[in-house]
Amino acid sequence: MSDFLSEWYSWIKALHLISVMAWMAGMLYLPRLYVYHADAEPGSELSETFKVMERRLLRAIINPAMMFAMILGLCLLFTPGVIDFSDFWIWIKLFCAFIGLGSMHAFLSRWRKAFADDRNVHPSGFYRKVNEIPTVFMIIIVIMVIVRPF
């Protein structure tokens, strides 16, 4: 298995990056849809349109992109000679990716379900603030991977 990971390392890394970009694009766009959906009258044509957009975005883009990003990331993690687990940067990166972005993904999914059932309890301003959270985790992750400050 380690020979396979080493031989395909560049492809795995490229596909991981593509998956992460798709995941982040969705994680940044979905809360933006929630901002507008929160202001739409429940049951209105506009609200129903947002429900379709949110479901499709989550199921067709965000969920598969997250799965590919995580699986390919684990492949990179276990490619021999790539990661030194004594370096602190990798632990910060993993925390931000799995706990930070993973939790954000779960919250976005829960909120989509609430919108689908016309049970949203948050105002549009809440989603405007939430929209910044994935960006913060993304910045930390990129700095950890590229700069490796620790």
Image (tube, rainbow, N blue to C red):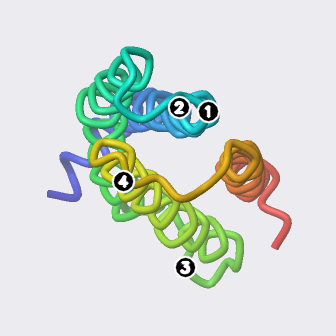
44 sits to left or right of 88: left
Q: Which residue is mark 4?
A: 114
45 sits to left or right of 41: left
Q: Residue 32 or 139: which is nearer the viewer?
A: 32
Task: Give the numbered dot on residue 31.
Answer: none
Are the two marked residues, 1 and 2, in contact with CB atoms closer than 8 angstroms? yes
Give the Cα distance between marks 2 and 4.
Answer: 11 Å
In x, y percent, where is residue 91? 60, 77
Task: Please report whichever mark, 3 or 2, sits nearer to the chain's N-terminal start.
Answer: 2
Judging from the image, what secondary structure is the residue with disc 1 in? helix
Q: Nearer the viewer, mark 4 or mark 3?
A: 4
- 73, above or below 16, in the image: below
The structure residue drawn at horizontal position 35% and vertical position 46%, both measured from the top left corner, is 118
Task: Please report whichever mark, 4 or 3, sits nearer to the chain's N-terminal start.
Answer: 3
Dot 4 crowding, Cα within 10 Å, few <14, some 14–19, many 20+: few
Q: Which residue is mark 1?
A: 39
Are the two marked residues, 3 and 1, in contact with CB atoms closer than 8 angstroms? no
Q: As shown in the figure, which amino acid type bears the numbered disc 2?
A: His
Q: Which residue is mark 3?
A: 85
Q: Residue 59 or 44: which is nearer the viewer?
A: 44
Judging from the image, what secondary structure is the residue with disc 2 in? helix
Q: Residue 26 or 75: which is nearer the viewer?
A: 26
Dot 3 crowding, Cα within 10 Å, few <14, some 14–19, many 20+: few
Judging from the image, what secondary structure is the residue with disc 4 in? helix
In x, y percent, where is residue 123? 66, 49
Task: Please report whichever mark, 3 or 1, sits nearer to the chain's N-terminal start.
Answer: 1
Give the Cα distance between marks 3 and 1.
Answer: 46 Å
Task: Give the numbered dot on residue 37.
Answer: 2
Give the Cα distance between marks 4 and 1.
Answer: 14 Å
Task: Please report whichever mark, 2 or 4, sits nearer to the chain's N-terminal start.
Answer: 2
Q: As shown in the figure, which amino acid type bears the numbered disc 3?
A: Phe
